[in-house]
Amino acid sequence: MSEDEARRLAEERAAAAGSRNVRFVAADAQTEAIAGEPFDAAMSQFGVMFFDEPVTAFRNIHSHLRPGGRIAFACWQPIEANPWFFAGAVAEFLPPPPQPEPGKSPTGPFALADPEQTTEILESAGFTNVRHTAHDVETEAPEDSVVDEAQLIFMGVPEDRLSAAMAAAEKYMSRFKIDSNRSRFPLAFQIFAASTR
C-alpha cells in the first residue's frame, strides 16, 4: 500500500467514525519534522522496531513533544516467546539478511525485544521515567493473518521457491490450528511508556 493509499484509507475511516479533529501525515518519524508541534503524546503500535538509528529516531520524537509529554509504544517480547513467528521454518528459502550500514542498527520485529536495551535507548534519547510492562495473550485468527504468499515475497523468497516455502510455513503453522478456518496464536508483546523532562 502506497503512502497516498494509506492516507486515503485513514481519512475514510476517520470520516466514517465521525472524527473531525484528526490529521494524517506520512513522514519518516526518525528524521522529519512534523508540523504542529509541540505535541502532548506520541504512540506507536508495532512500528518503532524498524528504526535503523533508534536513538536518533526517539530523540527526534522527543523534540516534537512538550515538556512533560509522553511516549508509549507496543513492541514484541523476544522471539523465543513468540513461536508464531515462522521465519525459522522458511530460512532455507531466504537470502542472507543484509548487514546494517556503518552506524546503523539491525531492524525487524524483535529489534526492541530486550527491555534493558530499549530502556537505554529511550534514556539516551532524553526520555525519563521509562516503564515497561509485558503482556502474554492468545488470539484466534485465520492462519493467513500471519503468513501468506505476499509476506513470503516481502521477506525475499524467490518466485521459483515460493510454493516450497509456503508448504514449509504451512507445515510449521499447523501446530496452531484449531480447525480449517482458525488458528490460536500465543502473542507475547510489551508496552513501553516514558516522559519528557
Image (spheres, rainbow, N blue to C red):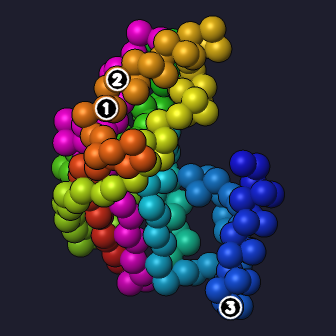
Q: Is disc 1 placed on a helix, strand or loop?
A: helix
Quadrant containing the C terminus in the rendered view: bottom left
Residue bounds of the magenta highlight? 67-94
Question: Residue 1, how many percent across, how many down?
Answer: 72, 48
In the picture, the disc for residue 18 is: 3
Q: Is residue 66 visible?
A: no
Which amino acid type corresponds to the residue marked 3 in the rendered image?
Gly
Residue at left offset 30%, top offset 41%: 177
Residue behind mark 2: 171
Q: Are marks 3 and 1 in contact (CB under 8 Å)?
A: no
Ranked by sequence position, the earlier of labels 3 and 1 is 3
Q: Is residue 148 magenta?
A: no
The answer for how far apart the CA atoms under marks 2 and 1 are is 5 Å
Residue at left offset 68%, top offset 91%: 18
Q: Is residue 82 magenta?
A: yes
Q: Is residue 185 above or below residue 94?
A: below
Residue behind mark 1: 174
Q: Residues within 10 Å of mark 1 (few under 14, many from 20)?
A: few
Ranked by sequence position, the earlier of labels 2 and 3 is 3
Relative placement, left or right, of 59 versus 87 is: right
Q: Is disc 3 placed on a helix, strand or loop?
A: loop
Q: Is residue 27 above or below residue 161?
A: below
Q: Are marks 2 and 1 in contact (CB under 8 Å)?
A: yes
In the picture, the disc for residue 47 is: none
